[in-house]
């Protein structure tokens, strides 16, 4: 949630219309040895707080949450990319997004969370406004379209990209949760 709100605020400050979207996400996952495959993500039964947040602009779906799946997994899974998928392309079969809503997140019921989010967004904006160029490196590659998947699959050691490319080419998938 923090990342999605911070990303939206930074994009809007640059004149890009962006919305935070909330709902469920499921991603195809595979073990580092390519012996176990399945689906993992962030979802709930639609009751209670939203399970996942991402950002959509007029052109792209932006999601940094997929990158965190290996750290949250109950079994060892291969590294995952950040998602920057074009909205004018159908979502790939190895990713599932189920939107539950779009709106500003009302955090008035939890004032401490509201303050933490405000502090995080403030830090994002301070970095954005700094005269010094940001020296940031991405923790992984960005899934921006099928050609970006093909490029990642050709790099040595990217088990997830190779498996996802096989799925994009027609390899059967385990049943998705939604």
Image (spheres, helix red, strand yellow):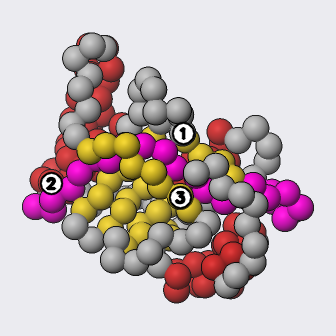
20 vs 157, nearest the viewer: 20
What numbered label is drawn on residue 12? 2
Can you give x and y, in whole percent of width and height, for residue 79 in the image?
A: 67, 58
For residue 96, which numbered disc appears in the image? 3
Identify the disc placed on residue 43: 1
First in sequence: mark 2 or mark 1? Answer: 2
Per the rendered image, the range of residues in magenta is 15-38
Q: Which numbered circle lies on residue 15?
A: none
**Label 2 secondary element:** helix
Is 103 placed above or below 159 here? above
Q: Quadrant of residue 172?
A: bottom right
Q: How many marks?
A: 3
Could you tell me which residue is drawn at 70 percent across and 41 percent down? Answer: 73
Out of 141 and 17, give the one closest to the viewer.
17
Find out whether residue 65 is within the magenta segment: no
What separation in Å lies between label 3 and label 1 (alpha carbons)?
11 Å
Q: Would you say 38 lies left or right of 147 here? A: right
Q: Is residue 167 above or below residue 2?
A: below
Q: Quadrant of residue 170?
A: bottom right
Q: Let me know if residue 30 appears in the view.
A: no
User: Can residue 37 be seen here?
Assistant: yes
Residue at 76%, 38% in the rendered image: 74
x and y percentages locating residue 146 in the rendered image: 52, 82
Mark 3 or mark 1: which comes first in sequence? Answer: 1
Residue 121 coordinates in the image, percent (x, y): 25, 37
């Amino acid at each position: 949630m923090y990342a999605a709100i911070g990303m939206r605020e930074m994009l809007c400050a640059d004149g890009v219309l962006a919305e935070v979207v909330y709902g469920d996400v499921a991603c195809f996952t595979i073990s580092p040895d390519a012996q176990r495959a399945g689906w993992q993500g962030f979802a709930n039964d639609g009751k209670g707080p939203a399970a996942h947040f991402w950002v959509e602009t007029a052109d792209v779906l932006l999601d940094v949450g997929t990158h965190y799946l290996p750290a949250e997994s109950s079994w060892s899974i291969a590294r995952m990319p950040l998602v920057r998928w074009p909205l004018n392309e159908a979502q790939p079969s190895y990713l599932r997004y189920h939107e539950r809503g779009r709106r500003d997140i009302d955090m008035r019921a939890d004032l401490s969370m509201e303050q933490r989010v405000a502090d995080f967004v403030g830090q994002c904006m301070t970095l954005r406004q700094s005269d010094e160029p940001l020296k940031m490196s991405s923790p992984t590659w960005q899934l921006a379209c099928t050609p970006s998947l093909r490029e990642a699959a050709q790099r040595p050691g990217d088990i997830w990209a190779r498996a996802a490319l096989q799925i994009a080419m027609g390899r059967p998938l385990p049943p998705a949760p939604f």
